[in-house]
Image (spheres, rainbow, N blue to C red):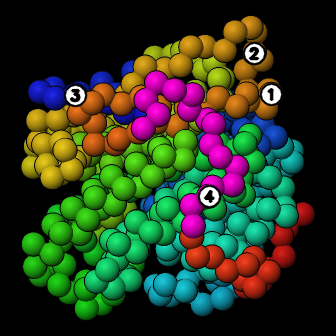
């Protein structure tokens, strides 16, 4: 939920609206919840930090952030792909991971995606249809979509975004909260493993092409946020939240350090708790704890590319969180219940916002169960399975 305000100075006080969760509080919030995370290596790090935070108050190591496809991470299990198959940087790379807590009250699953919508995703949706219904779905796919699928990648990305949101609308139960994580800001030089060798050469040698990919990410974020809002799904604008945290981005221009990912987890969990109507503890910023330093945000005007001018917001425009919904009446045991269906999506926008939502001021979670939008999809029984492994437990 965002508002677009003109002539505002950069605001560096976002921490005040965010709760810094302890492991015990994350365990309560996600008690008896099934969480599914889909996306690229950034979302895999989101999965890893959440799995770690469900167990103890510590940060990921640099080695854990860098590793991919390992057989086990912090008591989780590699279900398919990764080291069970072939480790590579191609668009057919697969990795499916799952964590089930020792108590059996927390289930978190991760699917690696190289495209936001594909036959592989249909196989994933089939698993979610016939398996346990997820309570929370966290998804993003952008960089692979815009860099590995030809010259018309932006057009294909827009079409696939519509397809994935329609399918999610059809498959997910009304009680499921879907959060679309917008892509995080890229650096001036990009050397991520998702790039083809020839494209990597051009991006590292020619600054204009690297800037083009950065602008493509902003444009892709605009389309994804708009379409997610059209389907009443929630959006977390990570591009906005991390636009001043460039010192926590790795030298490859794509990935982020453990402090950034813990900050991301706090933002995500605060959003989820708010959507579920869970009252959160109020505390001061913890000193001496393994959380991002107070200097997490370091404003740099040359890095402030939160929205390009041709999308309706220029350099003098800043995004700030909108007002929270009214609290849920009555006593609520903290985290010890299935949260009420309070899915806000992106219901209200100021007139100048680039994220146009037609249902301004109206109810936010009244999405059609079966959209009448015509899209070309194959029947589920003709799709290959999402993985060839066996689910643990």
**Residue holding disc 3:** 5
Q: Is residue 145 above or below residue 187?
A: below
Residue 372 found in image quarter: bottom right
Q: Is the magenta stretch mostly helix, strand or loop?
A: loop
Residue drawn at point x = 43 percent, y = 33 percent: 1
Q: Are marks 2 and 1 in contact (CB under 8 Å)?
A: yes
**Residue holding disc 4:** 372
Start-end of magenta stretch: 358-374
Of helix, strand and loop, which one carries label 1? Answer: loop
Residue drawn at point x = 52 percent, y = 37 percent: 345
| CA gap, disc 2 and disc 4 | 38 Å
Tell how many labels.
4
Q: Which of marks 2 and 4 is nearer the N terminus?
A: 2
- Residue nearest the observer in this picture, 121 or 89: 121
Q: Which of marks 2 and 1 is nearer the N terminus?
A: 2
Give x and y (percent) for residue 309.
13, 49
Q: Earlier in the sequence, mark 3 or mark 4?
A: 3
- Residue nearest the observer in this picture, 20 or 92: 92
Q: Which of marks 3 and 4 is in front?
A: 4
Give x and y (percent) for residue 378.
67, 80
Badge 1: how crowded within 10 Å, few (<14), some, or many (20+)?
A: some
Q: Is residue 281 visible?
A: yes
Q: In this view, does 93 lie above or below 239?
A: below
**Any mark on residue 83, and which?**
none
Please identify the residue farthest to the right as the structure is shown.
393
**Residue holding disc 2:** 332
């Amino acid at each position: 939920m965002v508002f677009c305000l003109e002539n505002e100075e950069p605001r560096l006080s976002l921490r005040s609206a965010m709760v810094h969760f302890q492991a015990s509080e994350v365990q309560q919030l996600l008690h008896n919840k099934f969480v599914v995370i889909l996306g690229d290596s950034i979302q895999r790090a989101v999965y890893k930090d959440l799995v770690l935070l469900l167990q103890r108050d510590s940060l990921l190591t640099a080695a854990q952030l860098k590793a991919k496809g390992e057989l086990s991470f912090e008591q989780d299990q590699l279900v398919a792909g990764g080291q069970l198959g072939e480790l590579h940087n191609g668009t057919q790379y697969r990795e499916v991971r799952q964590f089930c807590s020792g108590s059996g009250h927390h289930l978190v699953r991760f699917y690696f995606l190289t495209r936001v919508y594909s036959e592989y995703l249909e196989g994933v949706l089939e698993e979610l249809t016939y398996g346990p219904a997820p309570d929370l779905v966290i998804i993003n796919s952008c960089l692979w979509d815009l860099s590995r699928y030809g010259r018309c990648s932006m057009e294909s990305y827009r079409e696939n975004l519509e397809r994935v949101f329609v399918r999610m609308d059809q498959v997910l139960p009304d009680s499921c909260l879907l959060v679309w994580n917008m892509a995080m800001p890229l650096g001036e030089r990009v050397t991520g493993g998702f790039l083809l060798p020839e494209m990597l050469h051009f991006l590292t040698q020619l600054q204009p092409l690297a800037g083009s990919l950065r602008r493509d990410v902003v444009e892709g974020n605009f389309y994804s946020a708009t379409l997610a809002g059209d389907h009443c799904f929630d959006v977390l604008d990570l591009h906005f939240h991390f636009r001043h945290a460039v010192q926590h981005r790795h030298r490859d221009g794509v990935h982020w350090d453990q402090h950034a990912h813990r900050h991301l987890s706090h933002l995500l969990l605060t959003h989820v708790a708010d959507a579920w109507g869970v009252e959160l503890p109020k505390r001061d910023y913890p000193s001496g704890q393994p959380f991002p330093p107070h200097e997490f945000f370091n404003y740099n005007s040359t890095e402030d590319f939160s929205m390009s001018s041709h999308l309706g917001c220029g350099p003098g425009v800043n995004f700030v969180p909108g007002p929270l919904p009214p609290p849920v009446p009555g006593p609520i045991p903290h985290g010890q219940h299935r949260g009420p269906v309070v899915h806000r999506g992106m219901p209200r926008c100021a007139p100048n916002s680039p994220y146009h939502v037609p249902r301004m001021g109206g109810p936010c979670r009244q999405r059609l169960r079966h959209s009448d939008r015509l899209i070309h999809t194959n029947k589920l029984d003709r799709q290959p399975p999402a993985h060839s492994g066996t689910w643990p437990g």
